[in-house]
Amino acid sequence: MRRKLIAGNWKMNGSKAQGLALVEALAAHCREAESTAAAFDLLVCPPFVLLPVIEERARRAKIAIGGQDCHPKEAGAHTGDISATMLADVGCSYVIVGHSERRQDHREDDALVQAKASAALAAGLKPIVCVGETQAERDAGQALSVIEKQVRNSLPAGAGSRVVIAYEPVWAIGTGLTATPQDVADVHAAIRAMLQSEAGEEAAAQTRILYGGSVKPSNAAELLALQDVDGALVGGASLKAEDFWAIACASVA
Ligand code: 13P
């Protein structure tokens, strides 16, 4: 019922040439394995400046593109910021909001993340709302309560299944450490249960919950086979076409 979404977050990496080469390599895989590629949704989220560079090639290969952040306002005097409307204008269909790197580096809180997600919906984009606990919070036994608070306060009211949630334990990002399948299953089930009580059975059943944090070809199949894991948000491994493609293929293995 829920199509798997395999999303690549390039973070602050890549040149025009590298971005194009990466999308071209992914497009070649999609062409060569058409029926496999039709079984999942592929998304790449490059730095803003590379969006217009890769848009046409991605569109032709049916690879969606998305931003890594957006401003809550549609336009105005906000130097250095990019609005959801602008992202939609250059061909995006998704935008990541509330990534832990932005929550940390830019002190973004749940209220701001919620405003950004609302702006994304208003612009016709699907927000990928990121949540996840730090190592200290997990050690203190607070992982689920932290995540539940983030989900409750970061999701726009009435969003239904138009949002995607990404569970990314902060300590697993870029560290090579991955949450155990049992931990991932527990957190995803808790998020699904929350959605059921807040958004209703139907919206909860249709909402995709991604896992992110050191996803790689060697662990993707096990994580993506879990009942409530509806895809992956991939950082480092999404910069290598072979690895990203292998992760996507593992979602339908
Ligand atoms: P890594 O896959 O590099 O751990 O990054 C995960 C992430 O932050 C994706 O948004």
Image: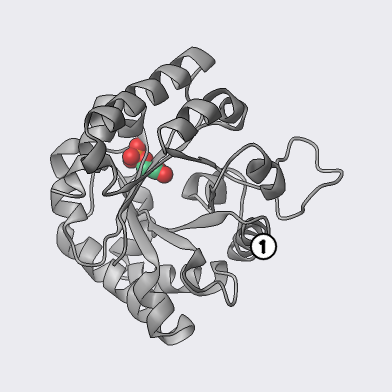
Q: Quadrant of residue 112?
A: bottom right
Q: Quadrant of residue 79?
A: top right
Classify residue 144 as left or right of residue 45: left
**Pick the front one: 195 or 66:** 66
Q: Residue 215, percent across and down?
A: 26, 43
114 relative to 10, above or below: below
Classify residue 116 as left or right of residue 175: right
Ligand 1 positioned in quadrant: top left
Residue 216 can be seen in this image: no
Q: Which residue is mark 1?
A: 115
Q: Secondary structure at mark 1?
A: helix
Q: Quarter of the image for the N terminus: give it.
A: bottom left
68 relative to 15, above or below: below
Q: Amino acid at mark 1?
A: Ala
Classify residue 75 as left or right of residue 50: right
For the point 67% across and 49% down, the residue is 84
**Pick the front one: 98 or 226:** 226
Q: Residue 170, percent across and down?
A: 38, 50
